[in-house]
Image (cartoon, helix red, strand yellow):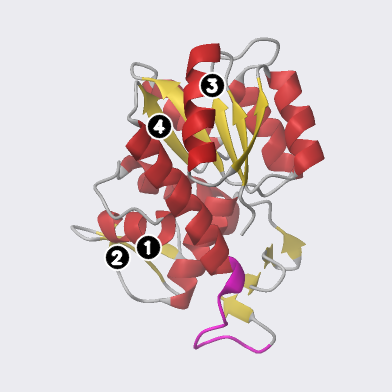
Amino acid sequence: MNRTIALVEDDPNLLDIVRFNLTREGYEVVVARDGEEALSVVRGRQPGLVILDIMLPRLDGLEVCRILRKEISVPIIMLTAKADEVDKVVGLEIGADDYVTKPFSMRELLARVKAMLRRAEILQDAAPSGGDTGAGIIEVGHLSIDLERHVVTMQGRELNLSPKEYDLLVYLAQNRRRAFDRDHLLERVWGYDYGGDTRTVDVHIRWLRRKVEMDPAQPSLIRTVRGVGYKLEA
């Protein structure tokens, strides 16, 4: 497991508190205090996780997230103010994997960090399951999922998925035709063992459909099951 965490926060008090607690849990923490420094740190250190504040000088967190998502498949947890509902949704749609609302408890943040890193490790080591066509390949309709290379192609064209979009697609593909509610997906894909915000699932499903469906307005792969949640149909 890559236990290096890039912490991007311009509030010196909050940065010191979060860095202290992460270090005490055994993580190596590299810090950045503005958006441009964040890009340099992440590109140079290749951390296993990025904790990214939205309100940053020089380059805001949303733009940093947008740039990083084009370059690297690192999990990103965004820190948002309590009233910034729009920023939460925008952050998820441009590629953030999760968000934590300020003010937050350190216990909650540490739990989400642990869950995110654990899920990344599990998926990296996961063996191919039933329905694969050899060499860790899952064929689902017009999609091909290469589990070893973490690459998804649609009719031969490689798709640019965020880590959580990829994780969610793989889980649904490995359990196709089974319907899962949002709480179940939060637990199995995000790794939460406590109540999370199920809107996170809805946003990722919507964004994933835009990338993998031939017609996102009429999805044929990722189906909504009324009163339950979602399932993937081959």
Distance from Cα at disc 2 to Cα at disc 3: 37 Å
Question: In which image quadrant can residue 101 be found?
Answer: top left
Q: Quadrant of the N terminus?
A: bottom right
**Which sits earlier in the primary sequence, circle 2 or circle 4?**
4
Residue sitting at x 75%, y 61% = 157
Residue on which disc 3 sits:
15
Residue type at tag 3 = Leu
Find out whether the residues at labels 2 and 1 contact each other: C-beta distance under 8 Å: yes
Q: Which residues are magenta?
A: 124-134
**Which sits earlier in the primary sequence, circle 3 or circle 1?**
3
Circle 2 packing at 10 Å, graded few (<14), some (14-19), many (20+), is some
Question: In which image quadrant can residue 126 be found?
Answer: bottom right
Identify whether 150 is placed above or below 141: above
Residue on which disc 4 sits:
100
Number of the label disc, if any, that sits on residue 36 = none
**Which sits earlier in the primary sequence, circle 4 or circle 3?**
3
Distance from Cα at disc 1 to Cα at disc 4: 19 Å
- Residue 127 is a magenta residue: yes
Q: Position of residue 5 (x, y in %)?
A: 61, 40
Residue on which disc 1 sits:
188
Q: Secondary structure at mark 2?
A: strand
Circle 3 packing at 10 Å, graded few (<14), some (14-19), many (20+), is some
Residue type at tag 1 = Arg
**Front: mark 2 or 4:** 4
